[in-house]
Amino acid sequence: FFFPFDLLAMQNGVRQLAEIMVYYAPKSGSSVGVRDFLFNGPLARWMVANPHVNVKTYVRGSKHPFMICKHQKNFLQRKGERIEWSIPLRNKSAKEVESHFDHVNNNSGGKAKKITQRHIAQPKETIQGFWTPEFQSQLSK
């Protein structure tokens, strides 16, 4: 069974990730991996592969790095206001930062729903009745 993960990041064929803002420090040791990702080529390759995402970088002196992600339809809301994803990047390598970029790009920005919470309501009862494990055991006899 193959499920394309790109469909999770799309709604009606439109990618949901709109913008990533990366905050880092120019000299801090916890920002080494972020600076390596930004300035040594991986970010440029990632942006060519994902032209729908706008990436902005901001310098913050002596602070830990993090990134804020904005989706087009952000379903996380508190008190009527949209909540952006804030992901810490402290002491991450360039590969780990790239994996965070890919993770955010492959998500729709909404809150994850458990499969057990989904319920398909039928408007009327079927003629044959509902399937039960006991019914299956009667068929196999």
Image (tube, grey):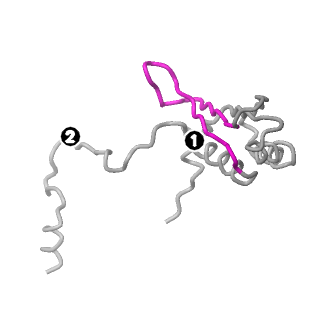
- Which residue is painted at 28% across and 45% down in the image? 120
Q: Identify whether 129 is placed above or below 136.
A: above
Estimate how packed mark 1 is, as few (under 14), some (14 to 19) or many (20 or more) residues with alpha carbons within 10 Å. some
Circle number at residue 123: 2
Would residue 87 be counted in the magenta stretch?
yes
Circle number at residue 10: 1
Residue farthest along the right direction in this orientation? 40
Q: Identify whether 31 is placed above or below 54.
A: below
Number of labels in the image equals 2
Q: Mark 1 belongs to which amino acid?
A: Met
Chain-order first, disc 2 or disc 1: 1
Q: Position of residue 99 (x, y in %)?
A: 67, 51
Q: Position of residue 3 (x, y in %)?
A: 52, 58
Looking at this view, is 122 or 113 the one in front? 113
Q: Are marks 2 and 1 in contact (CB under 8 Å)?
A: no
Q: CA distance from mark 2 to mark 1?
A: 30 Å
Segment tinted magenta in the rendering: 65-92
Q: Mark 2 belongs to which amino acid?
A: Pro
Q: Position of residue 25 (x, y in %)?
A: 78, 34
Residue 3 is left or right of residue 95, and the answer is left
Looking at this view, is 35 or 45 the one in front? 35
Residue farthest along the top direction in this orientation? 80
- Which residue is painted at 48% across and 30% down in the image? 76
